[in-house]
Amino acid sequence: MTTRVLVTTPDDDILLAWELMIHAGIRHLPVVDGSRLVGLIDDRRLASECMVRPLAARSVRDLVDHPPLRVRRDASLRDVAARMAADRTDAVCVTTPAGDLIGVVTTSDLVRALAGGLPAHREATATTMTPVLFRLTPVLPADS
């Protein structure tokens, strides 16, 4: 599970979300209201939206049409993988019972665990399990 997560909000511009994903080298971007998870967008959704309609002047809210797949922190890797396979998705958000985002598990995380890069049952520590959510805010020039 990745606990250092770059996030966006429903009101952010879609182009900003696209830029964040490209520059950070990520394929999934959780959408939060404060720390509460409200959605998840991925690069494929953004690319397909770009083909249908121009992204300019649209917000991330336009892409969030259903709650994302989520699991609780204590879910086993086997359960997470089974949920991802059943929902045919390549990412799942990890949340608290109240719906606050803790992290994201992707197929890359599962492959690393399968390859022995992550122990299947590691003991949670404050450093490995404390979520860190990052949100970048653009600084735009003042209108002249």
Image: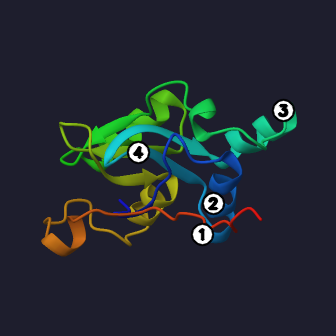
Query: Relative to residue 31, is residue 114 depicted above or below?
Result: below
40 displayed left or right of 26: left
Q: Which residue is mark 4?
A: 32
Q: What is the CA distance from the residue labelled 4 to the residue labelled 2?
A: 15 Å
Q: What is the CA distance from the residue labelled 1 to the residue labelled 2?
A: 5 Å
Q: Which residue is mark 3?
A: 53
The quadrant of the picture occupied by the C terminus is: bottom right
Identified by mark 2, the residue type is: Met
What residue is rendered at 63% in x and 60% in y? Answer: 21
Identified by mark 4, the residue type is: Val
Badge 2: few (under 14), some or many (20 or more) residues near its Cα, within 10 Å? some
What residue is rendered at 71% in x and 43% in y? Answer: 46
**Mark before the other along the chain sequence, 2 or 3:** 2
The answer to whether the residues at label 1 and label 4 have Cβ atoms under 8 Å apart is: no
**Mark before the other along the chain sequence, 1 or 3:** 1
Q: In the picture, residue 118 is in which quadrant?
A: bottom left
Identified by mark 3, the residue type is: Arg
Tell me the SS state at disc 3: loop
Q: Which residue is mark 2?
A: 21
Tell me the SS state at disc 4: strand
Q: Which residue is mark 1?
A: 24
In this view, the residue in front, 20 or 91, is: 20
Identified by mark 1, the residue type is: Ala
